[in-house]
Image (tube, coloured by chain):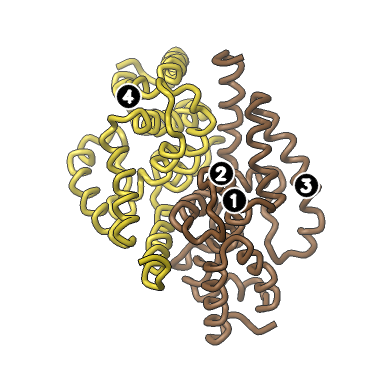
Chain colours: A yellow, B brown
């Protein structure tokens, strides 16, 4: 099975398909009040931060596994689009859209790699292992860092309040108590400054 | 030293600084003749491809190390900008510009992490280990894949010929004979189609 032309063609079909993630834009603005960030940039930033901040995981993590989760966790958005964390209507159809995307995109790969990367993707989604929980902490903390650097402009744009924002960021605590304490301090600072209305 | 406020502040200063890589644009166009790609997107794409294609490394590699090199190899371009692979004048000042950037940017980190990430960065640059050579193969092959998908439009835009292009891509052979064979086939196909003039 190894090293056939068909195998490498399938690997490269998947690699080329990934290019489309660079056109899936999120609701987070780049620092310095730049344009919105896309999924590929977000994934890259999360993966580096996972390596950099791994000492703050609640329990020691396999950082390679965390980095892979960070790099791949949004691949289904190529078809399903980005669903904003505070968009209740979009969230109601998110799972069905993402399941169909997952089946199509990972099936481009040779079977063994499809199964390998699906296991990484599903482990992130299930959010049960220390690695998945720490990757989710990155998924929350990375956009918080950018939004905080911009004076909370993303919250203002979407008219969300502290209750809703805390609801999402509490998940960070499962992956990293330390980063959750920092999250809490950042949210409190933004509430005090009037950047985030109390819920 | 661990878990102090100063430590995490330095880590986050570096993490936020990295955001600027999303504004460093390269000469490669996204597939589908899209806009130019930026360094963060390129690094993400390379890291995933390194994992996906690791079986083609000439000798077995520590894929975590390769992925870290892919993720970090362009960080100096935050200050120094992207130097196009075929820009002789830019290339002559590239090293001095990138050395100054390297000193500034990695010094944002706590000392232990500065040393750790500098070692990753310098190992890539020295291009002596199997990991560095395979990461360089990704650095060459990822934009080739995109450019090939666009009918070689990046070569036409910069008026380069096959001699120059082969000069760069021969390095891929040091990391992966298999990917070099594929590179050669892609270049021959583009020469035949008239997308790349013979040098």
In the foreground, A2 or B161: A2
Answer with mark 3 or mark 2, whichever residue precedes in sequence.
2
| Image x and y of residue A174, in percent | 34, 22
Q: Is residue A52 left or right of residue B32?
A: right
Confirm or deny contact between disc 1 and disc 2 (CB under 8 A).
yes
| Image x and y of residue B73, in percent | 62, 47
The residues tagged by marks 3 and 2 sit, at their Cα atoms, a distance apart of 25 Å
Density class for disc 1 (Cα within 10 Å; few <14, some 14-19, many ≥20) is many
To which residue does mark 3 refer?
Answer: B97
> Which structural element holds mark 1?
helix
Do tags 3 and 4 sit on the same chain?
no
The residues tagged by marks 4 and 1 sit, at their Cα atoms, a distance apart of 35 Å
To which residue does mark 2 refer?
Answer: B65
The quadrant in which the C terminus of chain B is found is bottom right
Say which chain tag 2 marks.
B
Answer with mark 3 or mark 1, whichever residue precedes in sequence.
3
Confirm or deny contact between disc 4 and disc 1 (CB under 8 A).
no
Density class for disc 3 (Cα within 10 Å; few <14, some 14-19, many ≥20) is some
Say which chain tag 3 marks.
B
Density class for disc 2 (Cα within 10 Å; few <14, some 14-19, many ≥20) is some
Residue A183 position (above or below residue A90):
above
To which residue does mark 4 refer?
Answer: A171
Say which chain tag 4 marks.
A
> Which structural element holds mark 3?
helix
Q: Residue at x 67, y 78 (%)?
A: B161
**Residue A179 appears in the picture as rendered:** yes
């Amino acid at each position: 099975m190894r090293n056939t032309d068909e195998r490498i063609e399938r690997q490269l079909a998947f690699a080329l398909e990934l290019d489309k993630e660079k056109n899936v834009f999120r609701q987070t603005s780049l620092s310095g009040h730049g344009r919105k960030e896309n999924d590929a940039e977000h994934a890259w930033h999360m993966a580096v931060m996972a390596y950099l901040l791994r000492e703050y995981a609640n329990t020691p993590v396999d950082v390679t596994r965390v980095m892979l989760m960070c790099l791949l966790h949004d691949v289904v958005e190529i078809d399903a689009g980005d669903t904003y964390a505070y968009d209740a209507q979009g969230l109601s159809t998110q799972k069905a859209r993402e399941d169909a995307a997952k089946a199509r995109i990972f099936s481009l790969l040779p079977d063994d790699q499809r199964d390998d990367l699906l296991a990484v993707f599903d482990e992130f989604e299930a959010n049960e292992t220390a690695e998945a929980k720490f990757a989710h902490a990155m998924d929350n903390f990375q956009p918080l860092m950018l939004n905080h650097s911009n004076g909370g402009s993303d919250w203002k744009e979407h008219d969300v309040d502290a209750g809703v924002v805390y609801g999402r960021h509490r998940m960070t605590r499962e992956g990293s108590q330390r980063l959750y304490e920092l999250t809490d301090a950042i949210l409190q600072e933004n509430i005090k400054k009037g950047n985030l209305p109390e819920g």
